Image (cartoon, coloured by chain):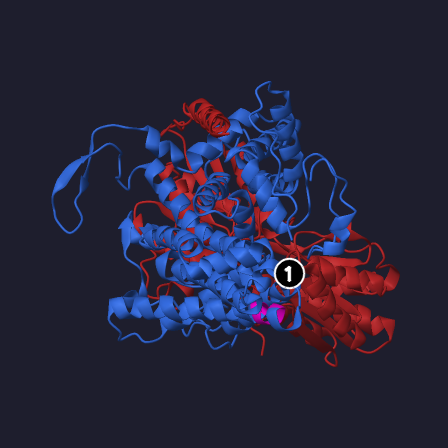
Amino acid sequence: MSTKRLTAGVLAVLMAAAVLAALLPAGGSARSGATFKAALISDVGHFNDKSFNQSQLAGLNLAKRKLKVQTLAIQSNNSSDYIPNLTSAIRQNSNLVISAGFLMAGALQTVAAQFPDTNFAITDDTVSSAFGDFKGADVHNIEGLTYATQQNSYLIGCMAAMVTKAAKGKQVIGVVGGIKIPPVDVFLAGYEAGAKKCVPSTTVLKGYSQDFVKQDLCKNVAENEIQGGAHVVFAVAGLCGLGALSAAKDHGIWGVGVDRDQSFLGTYILTSAVKRVDIGVFNAIKGAKAGKFKGGSNAVFNLKNNGVALGKISPKLKGRLRKQILAKVAVLRKQIISGKIKVPTSVS
Amino acid sequence: MSSEPGGGGGDLQTPPTGEPLAADSTAYAPSVAERLEIYQRAGGIVTPVITAVFAFFMGGMVVLATGHNPWKVYQGIFTGSGLNWFFHVGHHSITVPFTSHHVWFPWNTSIQSNAAYNLQQTLILTTTLILTGLAVAFAFRCGLFNIGGQGQYLIGVITGIWIGTTFPHLARGPHILLAIAVASACGAAWAAIAGFLKATTGAHEVITTIMLNWIAYWIGSYLFGQGGPLQNSTNPSVPVSDSVVNSAKLPVFWGNAALQGLHIGFFIALGALVAFWFVLNRTTLGYEVRAVGFNPEAARYGGISVARNYIVAMAIAGGFAGLAGVLDMLGYQYRFGVLDVQTSQLGFIGIAVALLGRNKAVGVALSALLFASLLYGTSSRSIDQTVLKPELAGNLTLMIQALVLLFVGADVLIMALWQARRRVLPRRLKPSPPASETA
């Protein structure tokens, strides 16, 4: 018996050794200091979220093709990945490291302080040592990429209110937010303000699913709003929001997509609040490559520079109503761009 | 038994599982005790090694099917996990603790080294996985399937954050000890609920621990969420806790503390492994726990309180998981948020760690290292992006984990193959009669 055990043990050790030996010659990362290298670190939403992170990855890949820069995309599976991912990008000689979202603000602040000579940018966060996530920090090497999504949400709020009025039911519209955080609330604020501007009697039902991933949670919140008479449901919750949109589809009412143009979901998608995070990433790389990295300041992407926009408008919206709505939206857009309308950024 | 049909007299004895005994040559009976017994006979560490190798092989096949080179992917994982650090032997120096002396050391411990940094991260994960693995393994040895590791881990996290962010005037030592003690105790109490329910009402621990996981999940979401009692005081719109105060942070003994260096919790986890082995093999408590695990009816007949052991075993298991949670908080994460509650998986991975490690101390240590290397090494940090797309890299970990679980579940198949190998061998020392005619 014991000899057999021994044989088995020796076999196992040999097998393990063989595997290790075979793996040994690994290593030796390619180094070329000459070209510019840009890195993008995802937040916990993953690069295949069909939304926020995926768009930014598209921006990175666009920069790779158009600007001939080296790129590095690193995915974070949980928040304890942030610091290793950021430092790993630096160790691989990245000239610009972009954090895909304000969830990484804390980790970015720590790492940026440790590597003062590397340039960083962060999507969706305002960089200032006076207030916010980077209050009191040295931000000379961090650039904020911010999106004025209240502006396109304002236009969408107006559209939603007008289609609801035309449907002659209860003048109620709904919005489902993920977690109540500033980048989510800014959509809600614009949406509500826009709806009240176009149809002052509109009631806006606001709910939060407390989640960005689980579609059933968003669906529940949306169902509640639909029970409350909502004729349009605007989903501002990443992957989770798809649940809210499917509830809208089930009840034959309008849905509104977010971040990317989600018109591919069907004609019930009135439009989408498109946030061109890809353009933000691309422009940040372009600027840094040209030596125009603006540490300590914030680049704003808005209706004027097409950083935020409306997605495809549903072909189901037809005839006079479509013309009316588009005319109204065009007027409001001009007023927002000219600064005549100041859209609020936080919900009351 | 292997030559007899499983019916007959066996039915009168009514084995505790109530399931009919299989009558094949492997003498397989689907009870935990039987399974452990078969494991014992199946040739030492061979089964888990084969299981892991199979899983890697199948994972490689999938990588191949997607048109990538599995060899390069596994090389990337290996380098990414930092395990290559051990193979770069050279002339380096290391400071002797508490002095400024340098002595020769074969490996490069400099924090500038990529491999060293990766290894630190892998060992940080190993620390957690050892403890969440022990949480499953200890309960398993008592015949309980503790799926509640994740919930117990979260309770440890919550308590750790609570103690770690309050009492800012405590000295460092007492603060850390207080946090660790209270968090482990809370984890233990949380798991003991399931043990208590099993002991008093017979409610199955699989069901109750899963339910307790969700309760812990939502408690965490509430406490760290908007307006929750543990939410940070500086930025009310972000659902994350405050950072643990400096006096509660564990010392980092390797690497840069600001960049997630390796904390001394690693040694606590190693100590926990020793404690696990010692309690199970060298104490009356451990003897009783194992007796109940093998056969609760026989243990009861022998004068052992089965109910008491269920509660105690679950409590000890929960203590390990709670310890894992608090060490993560005080060691390197320092804060926790609603999103972390949602994405945290380490408690669940503990199940895979325990199963692959066959609920033994050494096995758990090795499989924790394996899973930590996989988790950290499969990150898109380390895999060449031309070989495997970054959005796919993490999925490879999940796949290999799933395959390991699948093969562990299919241990019977592997053992049958193993037995067949023995039969083919000409030299048979014993016809390997199992411990027949029990009960």
Q: Nearer the viewer, residue A308 or A330?
A: A308
**Residue A58 visible:** no
> Residue A282 location, x and y as percent?
52, 43
Q: Nearer the viewer, residue A123 or B212?
A: B212
Examine the rendered structure and indicate whether residue A18 appears above or below residue B196: above
**Residue B354 visible:** yes
Q: Residue lying furthest top in this view?
A: B426
Q: Can you identify the residue that label 1 sits on?
A: B206
**Numbered-mark total:** 1
In the rendered view of the protein, which quadrant contains the N terminus of chain B? top right
Name the magenta segment's main secondary structure.
Answer: helix
Magenta segment: B194-198
- Residue B161's image quarter? bottom left
Kindly identify the residue that appears in the image at 26 percent across and 34 percent down.
B107
The residue tagged with tag 1: helix, strand or loop? helix
Examine the rendered structure and indicate whether residue B205 appears above or below residue A195: above
Say which colour chain A has. Answer: red
Residue B296 in the figure: left or right of residue A129:
right
> Residue B34 location, x and y as percent?
62, 46
Kindly identify the residue that appears in the image at 33 percent across and 50 percent down.
B261
Mark 1, chain letter? B
Kindly identify the residue that appears in the image at 83 percent across and 54 percent down.
A315
> Residue B339 location, x and y as percent?
54, 61
Say which colour chain B has. Answer: blue
> Residue B141 location, x and y as percent?
53, 54
